[in-house]
């Protein structure tokens, strides 16, 4: 089985962008840690885009190819009904990840459209949250 690890806008800059909030580790570090957490026989498809439509296309692709989705939608978390709708068309487990504790930040980050669909939400654990998300998908299948 394959887990789709989806990262949204600006997360390509992880490690360089606001390290006081998001830390100094990169998206490659995230991918490496998640791969290391996979049980035997599991695979990871790690994808990042700054484009909402690209993320939606990957979520559609996941319908036929993914045993679960671990997604950090970045700022689209707080704006995108379209990403929510795409996730609602996906039947497997969905775990929403935020590196920072969004609830400790500006009030516009307190609401998530994606949380209306997510089976679990992890915020504020840094990049460890992704690993917990991957573990959770593996243990629920
Ligand atoms: C984020 C939190 C969002 O509010 C923000 O727009 C991001 C990253 C996080 O991982 O903490 O881009 O999803």
Image (tube, grey):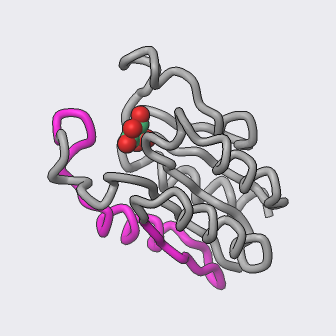
Q: Is residue 28 above or below residue 133?
A: below
- Residue at the location (41% across, 27% down)? 101
Q: Is residue 47 above or below residue 77?
A: below
- Residue at the location (72% across, 59% down)? 139
Residue 79 on image: x %, y % = 54, 36
Report whether 138 appears left or right of 124: right
Query: Quarter of the image holding residue 57?
Result: bottom right
- Magenta-drawn segment: 19-48
Residue 45 on image: x %, y % = 54, 77
In-front residue for pair 9/23: 9
Quarter holding the C terminus? Answer: bottom right
In-front residue for pair 139/7: 7
- Residue at the location (42% across, 64% down)? 49
Residue 24 on image: x %, y % = 18, 50
Please indicate, yes or no, whether residue 71 appears anywhere in the rendered image: yes
Quarter holding the N terminus? Answer: bottom right
Please indicate, yes or no, whether residue 99 appears anywhere in the rendered image: no
Residue 20 on image: x %, y % = 17, 34
In-front residue for pair 71/54: 54
Magenta span includes 136: no
Q: Is residue 1 above or below residue 48?
A: below
Ligand 1 position by quadrant: top left
Report whether 98 appears left or right of 56: left
């Amino acid at each position: 089985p394959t887990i789709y690890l989806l990262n949204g806008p600006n997360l390509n800059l992880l490690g360089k962008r606001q390290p006081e909030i998001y830390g100094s580790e990169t998206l490659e570090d995230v991918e490496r840690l998640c791969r290391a957490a996979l049980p035997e026989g599991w695979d990871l498809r790690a994808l990042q885009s700054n484009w909402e439509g690209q993320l939606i296309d990957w979520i559609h692709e996941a319908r036929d190819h993914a045993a679960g989705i671990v997604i950090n939608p970045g700022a689209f978390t707080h704006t995108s009904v379209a990403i929510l709708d795409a996730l609602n068309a996906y039947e497997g487990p969905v775990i929403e990840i935020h590196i920072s504790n969004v609830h400790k930040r500006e009030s516009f980050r307190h609401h998530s459209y994606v949380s209306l669909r997510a089976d679990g939400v992890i915020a504020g654990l840094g990049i460890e949250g992704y690993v917990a998300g991957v573990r959770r998908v593996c243990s629920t299948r």
